[in-house]
Amino acid sequence: MHFLFNFDNTHLSTYHSEGHSGQYYTLPPTHIQKLFPYGLPPRFQLQIKTFNEGCVMVRPPALELISYLKRADYSKPPLRYVLYGDIGTGKTMSLCHALHYCYSQGWLIVHVPDAHLWVKNCKELLPSSSRPSRFDQPIQASQWLKNFKITNERFLSKLKTTQRYVWTKRESTEKGQPLGELIDQGVNRMKSSSDVVGAVLRELRLQAGGATEGEGAFKLAVAVDGVNALWGKTSLKKEDRTMPEELTLIHNLRKMMKNNWSGGAILTALSQTGSVFKPRSAYLPSELLGEEGFDNMEPFVPVSVSNYNEKEFESCYLYYLDRNWLQHPHSRSEEGKKELIFLSNKNPSILERLCAFL
Amino acid sequence: MWICECGILQDVSLQCAKGCDVVFASCLSACRRANMAASGCRGVRSILWKYGSYGNNLFVSRSKMVPQLPLRQIYVASSLWKKNLAAAGPQKFTQEFIDKQVEEFEVGKRHLANMMGEDPETFTQEDIDRSIAYLFPSGLFEKRARPVMKHPEEIFPKQTAIQWDAEGRPFHFLFYTGKQSYYSLLHDVYEKILAIERHQDKMRNKGLFTSDTKQILLTGSRWLLKEEIEENLVENISVQDYMRLIQLMELLLSMPYCSLEEEFILKFRKQLEVQSSKYEIPALQYDPQGVAFSVADGRRKSAKASITLRDSGSGNITINGRNYLHYFPVLQNREQLMFPLLFVGMMGRFDIEGSVEGSGHSAQAGALRLAISRALLSFVSEGEVEKMRQAGLLTADPRIRERKKPGQEGARKKFTWKKR
């Protein structure tokens, strides 16, 4: 089973189909820099640095997602896709694969690499400037705005604000300003960055499907990894050590999840590894999302991700062999392969960790 | 009237409560104190020993009569009177005593048979052991401390009888070597060597000498150990003596016609049991579908595991209802599970379904590994069983948590040592 290397990758994602399942394709480096500054899983980023290229395996869940995206009707409210599965089976990678497809199609990407980061370990928690009972996270918000700017450069000048936003007594953004200015405002002024995020999301929602003229038309892809964080408990605390009632970023994201807009798709993936207060054995949507989350997300299209099957395992093994990643001579023999199968039970992340020290 | 050791005639009879030799001791000290310079004390003991049987009435006339001294009560420490038990050596039993014990044992055996309602004539040692274990149930952990009824030969250590006759002449001609049975054994072996050589010469004379005669089979047996030979000879031999004996036996074996003395030589060889025959292999059962499976248990450090190994599977393992990847996130534990299958080479062939409880994750992994190895015994050939045993897959790990002792923090750790 050989894997294929393609050097012109720009349109390859469109041509991925069932027959390509199990084969690797390379992500072009420019795309990686633009699209995924912080989007990819950390271990995969290390692998990119080591191998000097990012190779992703084409797998059935990602293919399924891409086929849905191809056939969806974008004049209707967006469909919600939820990738779920056991730990380490490749949910984030499949999400990134689908997102790359969207990017290569020219969509506008709203990518939250890990919603859990907004729910725990925040250094600063300020009371919101606009509303009294809400709390802001300026660092996370400004970080996200910077990433958004890098990803969607070409759209920033085209889109215009539809409404006047007042940040403080002295600062405000007028109607009709390009979106880029809004974002700069948020990056420069940390205090109001969370509100800026909310404003940006609102603008995108309003303009996503509405524009029918060729210039301003775009499709919106909202990708959230670790979506179960939005409806779970926070581990953040206020200064007097009580739980905050509401967080701005989370609130805005939740609004985004509702399908009251049109012209795009919502791709999400569940994640147990970063989640707070959830047992390790939970992996189904009902368990991880909780009742509230489940009600909010319904109806959604579940896509299950599982361990490698025989063919995929072969392919991964050959890829590592080809890159001289498996140094130990025993790992190149048949028995070594059987041992690897047993020890990792064909789980992608465990296999990767295992091969890392061979 | 008693005579003290100095030859002084005593009017008053001095006797201690026990009537033992205290008389002489106290008298001696009294006499010593009284006349130090007098020559009377020396050598008197020997005279007294010789005339010991004459007791009361003898009156030893001496050239120098020591004047009678006033008697004084002298007190001596009681440790002088106690017998030095260590100096006496192992307890000696007379032959009559041992014979009496043997009689009692036989009678007791018949009584026991009657008590248990069995036939006294065909009551074997195993039956005796069984009955004693039934009548006197003991919870003691040390098996040797439990009540036992065995033939006196096995209980009392073998002792040498008196080896000289009434006149003091030894019976055995090698008595004065000190290790008479050992040297007589060497003597016998050499006799046999000479006999074989004579036989060889005879065959040569007849012209029937051949080198390839029947050889004695020595595989599966070993020479008796030094301790065992000491036990047989009832005397101590040194390491060099033992090696000399073994050398002589090897010399005997190297001769062509040694099969003549086969019986003699085999007395000094001990059969080794084949270790792998000790393991009981779990029976191979069959499913309604015809799939073979076997069930086995394993234990390690208070963790108990029980598994079912099914044939014609694809290598999935379920433990306590969960996948082994979830149950054992640590790589080391999964390697432990893998080892028996990898060793035998049947990695993708079986499906394993197991349940385990108790102790920690490493101990559970070890228990499962033992259970898997045991279950594999029924799918594997004899030679493989021996290999597995040598690899240590079938040995139950005896290490258990050590007890905490009083006066210490833990099993080994002591409290802080303060110099003063």
Image (cartoon, coloured by chain):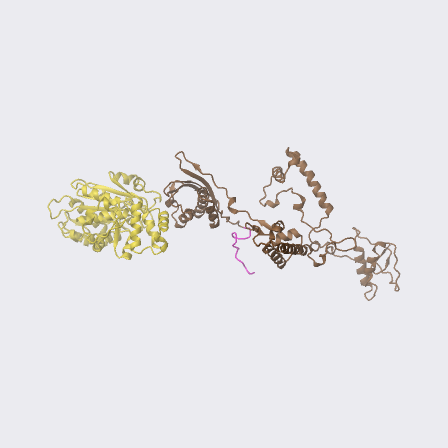
Chain colours: A yellow, B brown
Of the 4 image quadrants, the one containing the C terminus of chain B is: bottom right
- Any magenta on residue A190? no
Residue B347 point in image, percent of width and height: 39, 46
In the displayed orientation, state which residue is furthest to the left.
Answer: A213
> Where, by quadrant of the figure, is residue B371 drawn?
top left
Residue B100 point in image, percent of width and height: 72, 43
Residue A235 point in image, percent of width and height: 32, 47
**Which one is nearer the viewer's eye here, A212 or A67?**
A67
Instruction: Residue at 66%, 52% (x, y): give it.
Output: B233
Q: Tell me if residue B137 can be seen.
A: yes
In the displayed orientation, state which residue is furthest to the top.
Answer: B117
Q: Main secondary structure of the magenta part?
A: loop
Rendered position, B341 above or below B251:
above
Rendered position, A339 above or below B177:
above
Instruction: Residue at 63%, 53% (x, y): give it.
Output: B229
- Any magenta on residue B413? yes
In the displayed orientation, state which residue is furthest to the bottom.
Answer: B37
Magenta span: B405-420
**Which one is nearer the viewer's eye here, B266 or A166?**
B266
Rendered position, A224 above or below B32:
above
**Which one is nearer the viewer's eye here, A166 or B407?**
B407
Count of numbered circles in the view? 0
Instruction: Residue at 67%, 47% (x, y): give it.
Output: B156
Residue B136 point in image, percent of width and height: 62, 39
Q: Tell me if residue A231 can be seen.
A: no
